[in-house]
Image (tube, grey):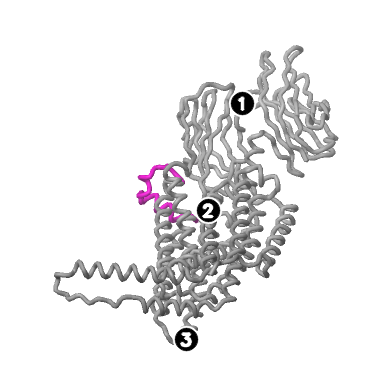
Amino acid sequence: MTATAPRLRTTASRSLTRLLLVTVALLGALFAGAVPASAHAALTGSDPKEGAVVATAPAQVALTFSEGVALDANSIRVLDPTGKRSDTAELVNLCSGDVVKYGVRLRTGIPNGTYTVAWQAISADSHPVSGAFTFSIGAPSATTAVVPTQAVGGGLVGALYGIARYAAYGGFVLLTGGAAFVLACWRRGATVGPVQRVVVGGWLTMTAATLAMLLLRTPYTGSGKLSDAFDLNGLRAVLETKPGAALISRLLLLGAAALFVSVLFGAYAKREDEAEKKDLTFGLAIGGAVVAAGLAATWALAEHASTGLQPGIAMPVDVLHLLAVAAWLGGLVTLLVVLYRSPGIERAAVLRFSRIAFWSVAVLAATGVYQSWRQVGTWSALVDTAYGQLLLVKVGLVAVLVGTASLSRRWTARLSEHTAPEADAALVVEERASEPEPVTVPDDGKDAKRAAQLARQQAALSTAREKRIRDADPERTGLRRTVLAEAGVAVVLLAVTTVLTSTEPARTQEAVDKAKAGSQVAVADRPVDIRLPFDTGGRNGKGTVELALDPGRTGSNDLRVSLEDPAGKPKDAPEVKVSFTLAAKSVGPLPVVPDRVAAGQWKASGVQIPMAGDWQISVTVRTSEIDETTVDKNVKIG
């Protein structure tokens, strides 16, 4: 019999097409009105700023982050030009309201020169972040300060931790999806060895990966040295953190999962009474669902979903997303193993899984759109950031997977149109009739080699018979091929997802890029503050200018300018002028001459900012008849 592909226009394919159209519509609606969401912590500001030259040594160095972070006394280090620490190793909590800000105090009497600030933290979504920047006191100088060239969470330890993360996801998919396939689609699968190996293999993989992550957590978030994986003090510290608690909870739930698996492949598999087996199926389904949801929650409670916008909604959505992934991909792998290793799966079981897979895709589409909205926020971030680009790759892989799944559904529908089980049974009878009778060899020790040879021959005949039975059904052969293609795409998809969960989310990356560009984002009803050093070149020509624009938005603003000498005392000057230039629109310079109100202080009212944009604010200070300088700063207003 020659296999022919089924018709392309089926109810299943039309349903999948509608699902994809709805997904696209939801994406458009959500991204059109998206607002920022948080995930990885990122450094969004510092005082002094990166590359700044300040006239006098500040009392402290302060860092502002995009979300909550975990720090200790060694998380922020200020190194002088010779590489020695210039801070007091006292962490100062400067948080206020929604502003996440920490700092360290500097020692008194530190000399002029270039200072290096090296920082390291653990963000609220459990990922380590780090960085370094410099600022100068008085004037820039050479520096020999050495900071780690390897980003925290990188190197060999980072690679091993990433592998463990991937293995944990894969183990969860096989354990949960395989068990769900047995209970919801093919109860007889509880007695099939290949199916048992899929589920037990998933449990073993997830358990080993969780233990590895627990041990690697200390070097992953700290030194980066593999030997620190066995540091008991570090392990004790990890257990006190949210990620450590999540990993321990996962291990406890895996203990409950082990009991579930033992019942599923033990008492349940041996139960023959259908009424009793039905009751046990219901109990196992409820218990298994609770354990599976708990395992999924260990990711949701400690990673991206637990921080940022709407965590109360994001965490249960993340749990649903993971469960849908497991039901679809885990069931897919189990079906693939059955199709290749067991000839006796009923077509009704394949149809049941097809329906489960369809609704899993629907849940994935809805929850995936919501998660993307939280982490990306804007259309431009989809193409301008690594996170957005990876997300596009993931969407493409999902589209390929859905397309391949639609082919599998067509083969499944085709299977239901035939009565091949009877043909399979006839083939089994025919094969068994053609088998040679087993040869009994006397157990006298002389013919052990002959006995082993006969056993191998019988095993080979049995394997060949099962293969012929499987290959005798052309529709099943077509289904095997499409399911194999699905599984191959699923492996790549899971790898991309693992990388995505450890990548800086798009919204956070955009905030970092803006901070590095030197633009200060003006917030309504909050003044824009600028502090810049100046040197007119003459006697007593050094000092610092501080400018405040209130409320820092388009329309009318109040402008205040003050000057300080290197000692921090008010500094007077014959003349101070300010101008505003919007180069992108060829507007300006718009001159403002503030009025002197006190020694070292000037003020102007009704300063008009005609439109929003990236404005250059220039301040001109004249300290004598011939000594004058202009300093400027780019500020985003509006």
Residue 540 seen from this side:
yes
x and y, in percent, of residue 369 in the image: 66, 58
Q: Is residue 322 above or below residue 343?
A: above
Depth check, mark 3 against mark 1: the one in front is 3
x and y, in percent, of residue 258 in the image: 40, 69
Badge 2 crowding class, 10 Å Cα cut-off, few under 14, some 14 to 19, many 20 or more, is few
**Which is nearer the N-term, disc 2 or disc 1?**
1
Label 3 and label 2: CA atoms lie apart by 40 Å
**Amino acid at the residue labelled 1:** Val
Which residue carries the number 2 mark? Answer: 492
Q: Quadrant of the C terminus?
A: top right
Front-lying residue, 352 or 32: 352
Range drawn in magenta: 221-242
Q: Secondary structure at mark 2?
A: helix
Front-lying residue, 530 or 147: 147
Label 2 and label 1: CA atoms lie apart by 48 Å
Which residue carries the number 1 mark? Answer: 53
- Residue at 61% across / 50% down in the picture? 391
Q: Is residue 89 left or right of residue 377?
A: left
Does the stretch in magenta take in 239? Answer: yes
**Which is nearer the N-term, disc 3 or disc 1?**
1
Q: Which mark is residue 274?
A: 3
